[in-house]
Image: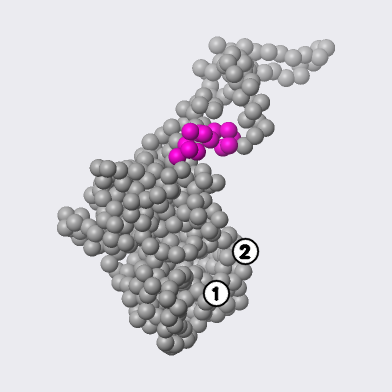
């Protein structure tokens, strides 16, 4: 059904408007708009809700007050550590999380009051290695057109300060570690956006030059020679903004009993090997992704930090099994790298992650609910942040009630710098967990022997932790 309305002025026709019903086409016509207006006015209480919400913060109005009284901050088992780190205005949570897991072991090993690694040191080499990884990706795809999906992905993702566990492993194994007082933070390591933007621009410019060299018939050997010069320029930018990392240093420590150790000379590699003494190759990654088959091993192409390093590889498991191993690790005093969709149902003031923190359904009287699979499929949820899983609270039957995450947003954030997560929130918004192989059973270890299913770098699960 159509209605044609003709507007005239004297003998002249000004315009013709053909009105179609909603059944005739996909547009919003006056009849449909009037129907929506009518439904809104008929909805009892909508006017009052509109007045309240339009003048206030939606999240505050959706806050479920009954959860505010659930303030139990005690845990059955908690990994011993000291101090809270602060990644400041950066996406380096993956690096802070990995180092926080390692430093807890160092603190307990040497009975230290407090200790931290230099995040700036490893971040320097992370950025240098990512630049090289990008250049090599450009070289290997130089013969493909600019609108090729992989080439396009490289140009959209040349470098960033986010990352994940395999970056922690590869950067530390290659470059070692240093204490924070040996190579402190710089302004730009704590505020990375401008530096990163400049490096991204440079990498893209260099990439176009490399592609032109290839198109002009110049061989890969010559292009790589040019790449080395461009990498030296990246090194210069990083040294100017972050400081130049030490290649050797002298260091000693004082334990909880005020005993001062012998002053020793180290390289970053010898410090990691001799002082820290942790085999990072003993760790494996789990994922909970209900969009894919459980019990399978997956690998994401080009999701690594170092050219010759490891792609992100994970075993997809149901959360109940993952939590079983996590309990063992915590009860044995070892924390874990944990990443999740931290922004969902986070009460930042109280430091809680609870699926019932905010009730938007009742506020708007609209159903917003999706299950985890649906959220992943529609890009509504994914891993956004990494933290160290450090405690679990169990009920009388040994089942988890809540968990504690050591965060890197400073000591004044959340609960004493930590976030407290309910077990239900763990199910809904946990994505990655890294755990020592010694806590796994033989059946699970055999699953890591299967050939991994290779996924493209633009896979929804690629998103780095920030």
Q: Is residue 11 left or right of residue 384?
A: right
- In the picture of the structure, the residue carrying the numbered disc 2 is 194
Task: Report if residue 211 is visible in the image.
Answer: yes
Task: Report if residue 464 is visible in the image.
Answer: no
Instruction: Pick whichever of labels 2 and 1 is earlier in the sequence.
Output: 1
Front residue of 6 and 402: 402
Which percent across, then down, holds residue 313? 32, 59
Q: Is residue 323 above or below residue 128?
A: above
Helix, strand or loop under label 2? helix
Q: Residue at x 29, y 57 (%)?
A: 331
Q: Is residue 67 above or below residue 8?
A: below
Q: Quadrant of the N terminus?
A: top right
Looking at the rendered structure, which numbered label has been put on residue 184?
Answer: 1
Magenta segment, which residues? 58-70
Q: CA distance from mark 2 to mark 1?
A: 19 Å
Is 62 covered by the magenta stretch?
yes
Which percent across, then down, holds residue 252? 45, 83
Q: Is residue 60 left or right of residue 154?
A: right
> Magenta span: helix, strand or loop, mainly?
helix
Q: Residue at x 63, y 25 (%)?
A: 50
């Amino acid at each position: 059904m159509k209605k044609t309305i003709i507007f005239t002025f004297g003998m002249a026709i000004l315009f013709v408007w053909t009105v179609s019903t909603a059944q005739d086409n996909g547009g919003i016509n006056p009849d449909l708009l009037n129907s929506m207006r009518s439904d809104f006015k008929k909805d009892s209480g909508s006017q009052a809700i509109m007045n309240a919400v339009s003048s206030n913060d939606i999240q505050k109005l959706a806050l479920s007050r009954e959860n505010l009284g659930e303030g139990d901050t005690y845990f059955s088992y908690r990994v011993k550590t000291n101090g809270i780190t602060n990644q400041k205005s950066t996406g380096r949570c993956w690096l802070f999380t990995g180092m926080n897991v390692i430093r807890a072991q160092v603190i307990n090993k040497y009975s230290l009051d407090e200790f931290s690694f230099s995040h700036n040191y490893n971040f320097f080499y992370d950025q240098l290695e990512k630049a090289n990884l990008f250049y090599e990706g450009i070289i290997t795809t130089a013969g493909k057109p600019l609108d090729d999906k992989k080439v396009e992905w490289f140009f959209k993702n040349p470098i960033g300060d986010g990352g994940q566990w395999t970056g922690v492993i590869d950067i530390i194994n290659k470059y070692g570690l240093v204490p924070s007082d040996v190579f402190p933070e710089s302004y730009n390591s704590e505020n990375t956006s401008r530096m990163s933007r400049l490096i991204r621009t440079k990498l893209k410019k260099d990439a176009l030059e490399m592609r032109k060299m290839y198109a002009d018939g110049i061989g890969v050997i010559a292009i790589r020679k040019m790449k080395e010069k461009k990498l030296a320029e990246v090194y210069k930018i990083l040294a100017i903004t972050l400081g130049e990392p030490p290649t050797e240093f002298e260091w000693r420590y004082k334990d909880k009993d005020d005993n001062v150790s012998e002053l020793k000379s180290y390289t970053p590699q010898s410090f990691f090997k001799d002082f820290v003494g942790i085999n990072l190759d003993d760790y494996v990654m789990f994922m909970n992704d209900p969009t894919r088959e459980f019990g399978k091993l997956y690998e994401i192409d080009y999701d690594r930090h170092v050219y010759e390093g490891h792609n992100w590889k994970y075993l997809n498991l149901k959360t109940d099994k993952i939590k079983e191993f996590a309990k063992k690790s915590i009860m044995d005093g070892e924390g874990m790298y944990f990443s999740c969709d931290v922004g969902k149902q986070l009460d930042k003031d109280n430091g809680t992650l609870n699926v019932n923190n905010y009730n938007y359904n009742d506020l708007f009287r609209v159903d917003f609910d999706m299950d985890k699979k649906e959220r992943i499929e529609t890009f509504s949820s994914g891993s956004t942040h990494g933290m160290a899983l450090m405690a679990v609270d169990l009920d009388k039957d040994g089942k988890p009630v809540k968990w504690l995450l050591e965060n890197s947003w400073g000591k004044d954030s959340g609960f004493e710098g930590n976030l407290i997560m309910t077990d239900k929130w763990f199910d809904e918004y946990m994505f990655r967990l890294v755990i020592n192989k010694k806590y796994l059973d033989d059946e699970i270890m055999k699953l890591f022997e299967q050939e991994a299913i290779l996924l493209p770098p633009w896979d929804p699960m690629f998103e780095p932790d920030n």
